[in-house]
Amino acid sequence: MSLIKRASQDFNLDKFNILLPSDFENTKHGLIYHEITNKGPRDRQVTYTPIRVVACLHKLESDASDPIVTIEYLNHGEKVKQLQISLADLRSKNNMLDRNEIYIVQHTEKFLYDFIIRSLQMLPKKLYYTDHTGWVLDGQGKLGFMLPHRYIAGTSCFNAQLYNLGIKEIAAYGTAGTLEDWKKNVATLCEGNPFLVMACLVGLLGPILGYFNQEGVILHYFGRSSSGKSTVLQVAASLWGDGTLNSKDSFVKTWLSTKGGLESMCVGHNETALILDEYALYSSEIAPVIYFLAEGKGKHTMTKDRAYRPSSSWRVAVISAGEISIFETMLERQEKIADGMKVRCIEMPVTPESMIMNPRDMPAEEFVRTLKANVGVYYGSAGPEFIRAMLMEIMEDQNAFRRVYEESIDHAVSVLIGNSCGSDLVIRVARKFG
């Protein structure tokens, strides 16, 4: 069966012939090379689909690394699609283009590679990528922070993006409204409500954990239904994305996952916050997961070609909620509760009265409705602005920044413990969450 399939009549080829080498042309049937031979001009078909190069991404950490090429093409379902592939993979004999419906005419691979290299040289600007969220040093040694929808730089002016996280969670980050909008309509309502304030503070721990290379933390709220647990999660989620529950773009995830699924979520929320609702949905053994989430190390695996794949790593602040206590669940299942778990995971019992202590002169129900509505309208600005503020402090004097951080922890421990001689466990918890 022929691989050639006509493009739809309303498909416009004009954009597929922008910034092409002059001896190549896209037609509805694919890429054509206008070859000049000893016998005269000759048109040689190279692919069975229109194709063009739209971007070249260089690794932010090092320009010397293998760049990623972004190719746009018309697939045989007559849809315009994009493929990102490294130059190394393009050079390999095990060609990845065929796997992605970019079918190459036999014995024309060298013409296609020449087309791609020459197209790259015609691109107007240089773009950069990194393969993880969180802190990164660019090729000039400048510190920045990568989110899927933006790169927060200090003095650098790179146009950077994430590449190939291999997870769906990157869509959860987003912004609506300004920081002032969020302060007025969300943060102001949290004032005088300790549980809401605590969730916001822990929700901003991720960048600090990452910068100082600290283990992750888990904060779990538990209480009966309608006690306000989900509201707390929504407020924390609004730091980084949409706080609306059950929407496709919600930053609030659930515990309904395998351990592998949790690993993907942790990688996608590296050095920010992972918000998990409905703890009762997680049915596997919980003890290993506490260490797994906090220590930030995934399993070593192999690719489908039996090659070694490095394990994933992350630093994340987890804010969780459910109707039941994590540690009570472990006791019921006769799982051992080690001191290390209590250091990494703290729990807070929630009641409607303790959750909403200052409803701002509104009935409690109206206060909750207002807050829930606002986190779906004003969100995603506070987290990035916190990172920007951190960057400014670090750039001004990183030693002073570290000193202030350490002094703040010491002060918090002093306030929390007071003059009492707290146990080693209590002091460790106070230092981690202080």
Image (spheres, helix red, strand yellow):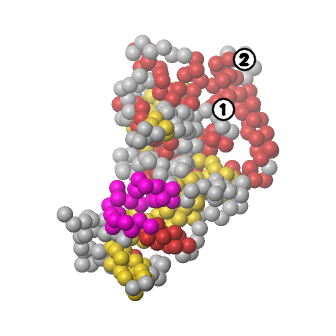
Check the image and report above or below for 350 versus 29: above
Please indicate whether residue 283 sits to the left or right of residue 133 in the image.
left
List the residue tagged with mark 1. Answer: 434
Q: Is residue 53 magenta?
A: no
Relative to the observer, which residue lies in front, 373 or 264? 264
Question: Which residue is depicted at the point 58% across and 71% down?
Answer: 125
Taking the image as shown, residue 428 lies to the left or right of residue 124, namely: right
- Residue in the image at 64% along x and 19% along y: 425
Q: Can residue 354 be seen in this view?
A: no
Find out whether the residues at labels 2 and 1 contact each other: C-beta distance under 8 Å.
Answer: no
- The span picked out in magenta is 83-110
Say what amino acid the circle numbered 2 marks: Ser
Pick the front one: 269 or 124: 124
Picture mark count: 2
Residue 53's place in the image compared with 307, above or below, is below
The x and y percentages for residue 9 are: 24, 78
Q: Where is residue 334 in the image (x, y as percent from the top left)?
A: 42, 12
Labelled disc at residue 420: 2
Taking the view exactly as shown, the residue that stands out farthest to the bottom is: 40
- CA–CA distance in space, label 2 to label 1: 17 Å
Q: Quadrant of residue 5?
A: bottom left
Find numbered disc 2 in the image and state the secondary structure of the residue it sits on: loop
Could you tell me which quadrant the C terminus lies in?
top right
Query: On the rendered image, what quadrant is the N terminus found in?
Result: bottom left
Q: What residue type is labelled 1?
A: Gly
Identify the residue at horizontal 49%, vertical 38% (top origin).
308
Which of these two is toward me, 335 or 45?
Answer: 45
